[in-house]
Amino acid sequence: MEASRTFYSDIMGAKVSTVQLVSPYSEKGPLNQYLETNPVGGMHHIAIEVTSITGAVDAASKKNVRILSGLPNFGEPNSVFLDPADSNGVLIQLIQQQYEDSSKN
């Protein structure tokens, strides 16, 4: 438990703000695959909102946390997934709700 608290608060800088319940929107997708493996359900992943997706990716990488999805997905919203092997077995999505202005870099 302490390792998880340290990971989320100290390494990721997380604070609890929202819990979102989701259900599959199609018969073939990651949530359906999860439910086939875990028929009683449970937690699929944690999403953490960040102010800068590129800053969060850089910070995670510097702390040897691997990014599963490679570069940020600059869709709506911008997001990446962290390797569960580096986050106590939990799939974590870093998510930025608004686009970054790359012209300011």
Image: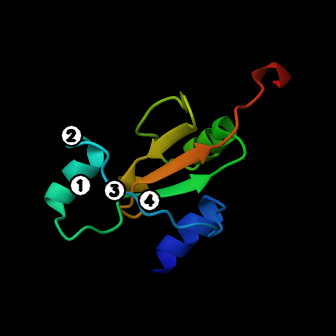
Q: Amino acid at mark 1?
A: Tyr
Front tag of 3 and 1: 3
Q: Colour scheme of this structure image?
A: rainbow
| Of residues 79 and 71, the one drawn nearer to the viewer in this rendering | 79
Q: Earlier in the sequence, mark 1 or mark 4?
A: 1
Label 1 packing within 10 angstroms: few (<14), some (14-19), many (20+): some
Q: Secondary structure at mark 3?
A: loop
Vertical placement of residue 62 versus 49, above or below? above
Label located before the other in sequence (3 or 1): 3
Q: Amino acid at mark 4?
A: Ser
SS at badge 2: loop
Q: Residues within 10 Å of mark 3 (few under 14, many from 20)?
A: few
The disc placed on residue 28 is 2
Q: CA distance from mark 2 to mark 4?
A: 26 Å
Q: Determine which quarter of the picture holds residue 61.
A: top right
Disc nearer the start of the sequence (2/4): 2
Residue type at mark 2: give it.
Lys
Question: Which percent across, then down, holds residue 32?
Answer: 22, 50
Residue receiving disc 3: 23
SS at circle 4: loop
Look at the image and tell me whether residue 66 can be seen. Answer: no
Q: Quadrant of the C terminus?
A: top right
Q: Quadrant of the N terminus?
A: bottom left
Percent position (x, y) of residue 23? Answer: 34, 56
Residue at 63%, 63% in the rendered image: 14
Q: Is residue 105 left or right of residue 11?
A: right
- Report which residue position mark 1 lands on: 34
Residue 87 is drawn in which quadrant?
bottom left
- Numbered tag placed on residue 87 in the rendering: 4
Is the C-beta separation of discs 4 and 3 under 8 Å? Answer: no
- Counting residues from the N terminus, which is met first, the one under dot 2 or under dot 3? 3
- Sooner in the amino-acid sequence: mark 4 or mark 3: 3
